[in-house]
Image (cartoon, rainbow, N blue to C red):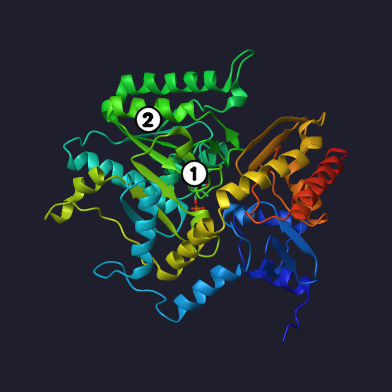
Amino acid sequence: MELNTQSDWVARSLRSVWHPCTQMQHHETIPLIPVSRGKGAWLYDHEGRRYLDAISSWWVNLFGHANPRINAALKDQLDTLEHAMLAGFTHEPVIELSEKLSALTGHVLGHSFYASDGASAVEIALKMSFHSWRNNGHADKQEFVCLKGSYHGETIGALAVTDVALFKDAYGPLLRASQTVMSPDWRAAADGETPQDVARRAAAHVERLFLERGDKIAAIIIEPLVQCATGMAMHDPLYLQLVRALCDQHKVHLILDEIAVGCGRTGTFFACEQAGVWPDFLCLSKGISGGYLPLSLVMTRDAIYQAFYSNDVTRGFLHSHSYTGNPLACRAALATLQIFEEDGILNANRVKAARLTKALQPLAQHEQVRNFRQRGMIWAFDAIDAPQDFSRRFFATATEHELLMRPIGATVYMMPPYLLSDEEIDGLAANTLAVFNQVMAG
Ligand SMILES: *Cc1c(COP(=O)(O)O)cnc(C)c1O
């Protein structure tokens, strides 16, 4: 059947597919790789070359490609119920998933609202926060606060709380204004300052803003522990504790965007567990379906849910998507959560993480590297005096070393799936070093 060659697929894709986050003209020099299949941590092209998916296909894949257990669950679900609308109807996968997630928060976040992508989850959290304040007689609370370097998705509402210069420059005129506060990124530490000191300094910035206009602010939105898209900027959990206390004090909602850092990525199932705090809204997507199907959700407290509970339609939460709570996606999520439980993934990851950190020491100590950092299953470091086009060159060179990696600017990072063997871990470290040296040599 397969008459097309690798280069046929490339040509056809470039003729008809508009790729995301891509200046399409760059594909005149940067390879476009048609994937024919995936297995475990590997993606295979049409010429039999393979690529270790060291960034989990944009941070979504947790237990490998074509995972037999998730596949089996989906095949069963496919023959049972592929989809039913979630207004007026409900079904087993969405109920079980909501119950399981609630239990994972000790039932603090007792209700889950569903969508399909991360940006929509962020929009839902923003709308819910605003609307619940209004339902409670605080209609003036209409503003949102985000962090310097924040990333919460690329729809117009989510972009309004995203601080990426490239996007702001392009789409600024379309966006609602929001307040931006200092990032607690520990790389901002002055001489003699600890990451906790940076956390305190950043929280003081939040406090000043809340004192000034807390009565106008509905919510602050934060990626807890690691601001991923800005370049894996990591902060001390103390920051989350301090901001939680400020939110309570000034009656501002705390939205934690765990779309990238949730699902075990930072070492605990939810990143906020490491600070011992719960938000008012928690957004999940990416890894929750194991990287199989588009699924996102917002978990919230019963007090927020109650603010909408009434016989008045206009006090209800006004939001829906056609595929809300899709049974196949929920079933993939249930299979994913089952693997966490059955295989003791959080513990197993600690062992894998220690091995990869050790294997990466030549890079951590490299004279052209600074700020080597790790949290859970995220590693990152910054190249010193990176050459022009570092990121694109790194990507292209990595493909020649059986690696899928896409640095963010001069920041090289890894977010591998949670199933690497010792051999794969050691190969990942050795190949990353080889690619780095080759790209830095120009
Ligand atoms: C990826 C991401 C989003 C957006 O999710 P999409 O599914 O791409 O819309 C939002 N927030 C964070 C922290 C993310 O990493």
Seen from the viewer's position, the closer of residues 293 and 408 is: 293
Q: Residue 134 placed where, x, y %?
A: 20, 40
Label 2 sits on what residue type?
Answer: Arg
Residue 15 visible in the snapshot = yes
Picture residue at 40% right of the left edge, 70% below the top: 327
Q: Nearer the viewer, residue 121 or 354?
A: 354
* Quadrant in which residue 257 is drawn: top left
- Please say whether residue 324 is visible from this viewpoint: no
Q: Are marks 2 and 1 in contact (CB under 8 Å)?
A: no
Residue 295: x percent and y percent?
45, 60
Q: 242 or 221: nearer the eye?
A: 242
Characterize the local packing of mark 2: few (<14), some (14-19) or many (20 or more) Cα atoms within 10 angstroms. Answer: many
Q: Which mark is residue 366?
A: none
Left or right side of 312 for 382: right
Residue bearing mark 1: 171
Q: Secondary structure at mark 2?
A: helix
Give the position of the C terminus as an image quadrant. top right
| Label 1 Cα neighbours within 10 Å, binned few <14 / some 14-19 / many ≥20 | some
Q: Residue at x 30, y 50 (%)?
A: 110
Q: Which mark is residue 244?
A: 2
Q: Is mark 1 within 8 Å of ligand 1?
A: no
Where in the figure is residue 98, as x and y percent of width and height?
A: 35, 58
Kind of residue at badge 1: Tyr
